[in-house]
Amino acid sequence: MEAENLTELSEFLLLGLSDDPELQPVLFGLFLSMYLVTVLGNLLIILAVSSDSHLHTPMYFFLSNLSFVDTCFISTTVPKMLVNIQARSKDISYMGCLTQVYFLMMFAGMDTFLLAVMAYDRFVAICHPLQYMVIINPHLCGLLVLASWFIIFWVSLVHILLMKRLTFSTGTEIPHFFCELAQVLKVARSDTLLINIVLYVATALLGVFPVAGILFSYSQIVSSLMRMSSTEGKYKAFSTCGSHLCVVSLFYGTGLGVYLSSAVTHSSQSSSMASVMYAMVTPMLNPFIYSLRNKDVKGALGRLLSRAAFCLLRDTSSELRGCYGSLKQM
């Protein structure tokens, strides 16, 4: 089939996870539930951090940013997938596919940067506790987040501009449930050497350097803990890192699983299932990890829900009194 440049009216076909019609309602219910749990959990984390003055610290500032990024990350893919399942359609427009690739790169890259910044925050808090508020000040926190957004914005934009130069066949099928960059490059009909080189450089920037920063931070943390004489002090210091370590392990573990599944096996279904863990399960579990393992977050969530319940009961009581007064006047 002759390759041709795509226009805004051209479409890709997302093959999804399964063609079995009987599985579609199950997949729809499962992914809708996961999406709602993810959005609700991350929004609760953001509300708890913003509404509780005890959590107005650098660590929870970065956590609220991570929750925001995770919400955006899962919202880039799941709504379109749910629409396709419900409509029994597989199409996605060319511009829609490019948009998915762009935002997936942006939010995945932001995850790596934020996890590295959070590791640095824990390193300063444990290894230099007396200088913590001087080093990790609000100005630096804002600067780190803005710099991360700036870098990932341009890296993602360069990839999209290079992708617009590629050619595809009409009705190109993507063996996935969303437009993943690697899968899109595999079905391109034109030479992808340049964009692959840029992709490798970006992988080093967004993957190797943040991972190196995380490993360095925790090597220094472990070294500092080994010098502590108090067992209780060691436990208290390391407990502040537990949630972050779990999230880092989950994020990079599922990401590595996606890479290995696509490299080792040629089965598109195995690769898609691995991507479910990376794109959906990880953002869903992050709020649970931070809320279940962190007493401060659990306390803030409890106070937030108590205030919400109190306001609801107060409003309901006011409405009942109003109705009772109206009945007495009749």
Image: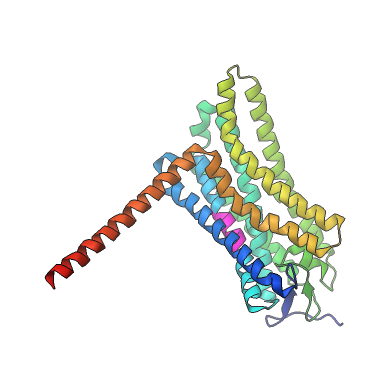
Magenta residues, start to end: 68-76
Residue 125 drawn at (x, y percent): 55, 31
Q: Residue at x 58, y 18 (%)?
A: 230
Residue at screen point 80% across, 81% down: 4
- 107 left or right of 202 in image: left
State the image quarter where residue 12 is shown: bottom right
Q: Where is residue 233 drawn, in percent x and y?
A: 56, 23
Residue 50 visible? The answer is yes
Figure check: 277 above or below 29: above
| Relative side of 266 to 115, left or right | right
Here the colouring is rainbow
Relative to 3, say whether 80 is above or below.
above
Furthest residue to the top? 229
- Number of marks: 0
**Image quadrant containing the N terminus:** bottom right
**Is 258 above or below relative to 228?**
below
Extreme left residue here?
A: 329
Judged left or right of residue 36, residue 105 is right
Towards the viewer: 144 or 282: 282
| Residue lying at 74% horizontally and 45% vertically, measured from the top left | 208
Front residue (pair 62, 245): 245
Residue 170 vertical placement versus 219 (above, below): below
Which of the two residues, 16 or 118, is positioned nearer the viewer here? 16
Tell me residue 143's x, y (percent): 54, 47
* Image quadrant assignment for residue 276: bottom right
Task: Give yes or no for residue 73 being in the magenta stretch.
Answer: yes
x%, y% of residue 224? 63, 24
* Residue under the point 50% across and 45% down: 61
23 falls in the magenta region:
no
Q: Quadrant of residue 87?
A: bottom right
Quarter of the picture holding the C terminus: bottom left
Q: Main secondary structure of the magenta part?
A: helix
